[in-house]
Each structure stands twice: as C-alpha cells, then as structure tokens.
Image: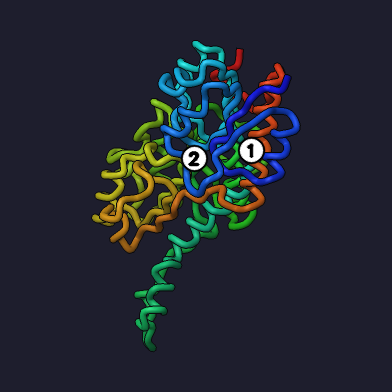
Amino acid sequence: MKPTVYIARKVPTEVEDYIGKHCNYSKWDQPGPIPREVLLENLSNAEGLLISGGKINQELLDHAPRLRAVSTISVGYNNFDLEAMKARGILGTNTPQVLNDTVADLIFALILSTARRIPEMDRYVREGNWKRGDDENLFGIDVHHKTLGIIGMGGIGEAVAHRGKWGFEMNILYHNRTRKPEVEATLEAEYCSLQDLLRKSDFIVLMTPLTPETHHLIGAEELALMKPTSVFINASRGATVDEEALIKALQTNKIYGAGLDVFEREPLAHDNPLLSLPNVITLPHIGSSTEQTRFEMAMQAAQSLVSALQGETPANLVKELRS
C-alpha cells in the first residue's frame, strides 16, 4: 500500500507526478502560501509532508499522528523543531548543494550592484538627473583585487570564494566552525577569526545557517570593526544580523553600504528605515529564485521524501536527525 503524502505548496507537474508514482497524495494548489489552519486540517492521515517554510513544531505534530517524514524545499531548516521531531522519530530533509551556484551568482550581483551603486545610478538616469559635468558624484568602489571575507564556508561560501578568486582576483579570507584545508589550498584562502575578518575585509559576505549561536552574529560590536569603506552582504537568514544596529551603521556611514536579500521580518515593512537609505540594496529573498534551480530543489525534496517513506535513509537527512 502506498504511503500518504500532503504537498503543502505548488510544485512543478513533473515533481507531483514523481510523488504520485510512489505515494497517494493531496495538495495545496492555490496561489500564495498555505494558511496554517488549512495545513493543520489536512495532516490527519499524512505520513509524509512536502513543504517550504512553516513551523514543524509540536502543534503541527499533534495534528499529524501518522507523520513519519518532512521534506523542506530549502537549504535552511530552522523551521524544524528538532527536539519535537526526534521525540516522535520523524525524519527531516532539506535541499543543500543544488542551489549553491545560483545563490553565489546573486551574492556577486549584490556585491557589484552595491559597490558601483547600480540601482541608485539607474534611478539617477531615469529621473532625468544625468548632466554634463557629472563626475565624482557618480563614483563607486572597485571590486577587483579587493579582500573578500566569507563568514560560513559551506557550499555557497565556496562558490562565492571561487567567483571572487578567479573572476575578480580577490584575496579570500574566511571564518567557519571548522577549517577547510582544500579551500585554503585551491583558492589560497586564509582562515581567520571573525574579528580579524571584519577588520581586514573590503566585502563581507554572511552565509551562516540560523542557529541559537548565530542569532545576531553581526551586531553593533561587529559592525564597529568593519572599515568605513566596507560593503556588507547578507544572503543567509535575516536574524543572523541585528537589523537595528545595521541600520544605525548605514545611517551614520560607519560602513559604505549593504546588499541584503534577507531580513529579520519578511516581507519587509514599508516603513523600514532600510528602504530610505541610498547605500542599501534590498531584495525580496530571491537567492535561489530561478526556474531551473527551484525545479531541482523541489525534485530533490520529493526524492528525499519518497526515500524516507520507503524505509531508506534519505540522502539529505538533516544532521541533527541522523541516528
């Protein structure tokens, strides 16, 4: 007998067909995210859940007595209540690696756009402000041959480092929970403390997962260590940064600028001071948002879910739930 799955977000037809070959399923197929109450109402018979975001906590588990596996279409899984899932023996999977290059491309788009003030200059032209004699008022800063500091040298961090080293001849610094000798050898990257990285880097990219240890990893003290000419990029999770402290640093020109794809509260409130600052680029959390990458993420998540429900150890079982 096929296991029963609930698909809690729209997925490509090929992904749905794959699940249908191995499982009985029902789904949410309306535009936008599934309302929490609708999700809970549809879990009474579900053995598997395919989801993207939304808390997998005790409340949800109480509505899903048959649940055996949850697969999230994302790299981050801070929405998993790992202790509650462990207590029930529920497997949880994510989708690492498949989006590394796509997110790294976006990070470099933020680096270049912030350094050369691309959105600001675009508005300058469109609003009819470009005139003969413009010169220093249009200056940005160079990216090539500068120092790139990467906080969190996972797969995405390595892809960013590769682009910086071989595309822009940048000097690579990194800070990570563990050293990466292979990265040091192939990219001539230098391992250093967080404080030294912040002091020395011209461009600082934050790519750590959100955990209790990394919550507000970058705050007022860390921002004070950065050069006044430095650019800060965050494409990890919004809560890894003390947003209020970042706003103050940008308002007072403690740092040159910031490129942000994530925020403490999403969507970003219309009155958030970040939106009024010319030295900030704001994006709507689109790190992995290309058609091909999102398809591959959804298929990988579906394959992991089916594998778990068939009694196998899925390839992308999150480390905290491995036995």
Front residue of 141/283: it is 283
Image quadrant containing the N terminus? top right
The picture places residue 281, in percent across and down from the top left corner, at 40, 58
Q: Is residue 201 visible?
A: no
Q: Whole-percent x and y of residue 316? A: 64, 28
Q: Residue at x 25, y 49 (%)?
A: 248
**Above or below 67: residue 275:** below
| Amino acid bearing label 2 | Met
Q: Amino acid at mark 1?
A: Gln
- Figure quadrant of residue 258: bottom left
Where disc 2 sits, the SS reads loop
Residue identifier under label 2: 207
Separation (CA) of disc 1 from disc 2: 13 Å
Within-10-Å neighbours for mark 2: few <14, some 14–19, many 20+: many
Q: Residue furthest bottom?
A: 132
Q: Which mark is residue 97?
A: 1
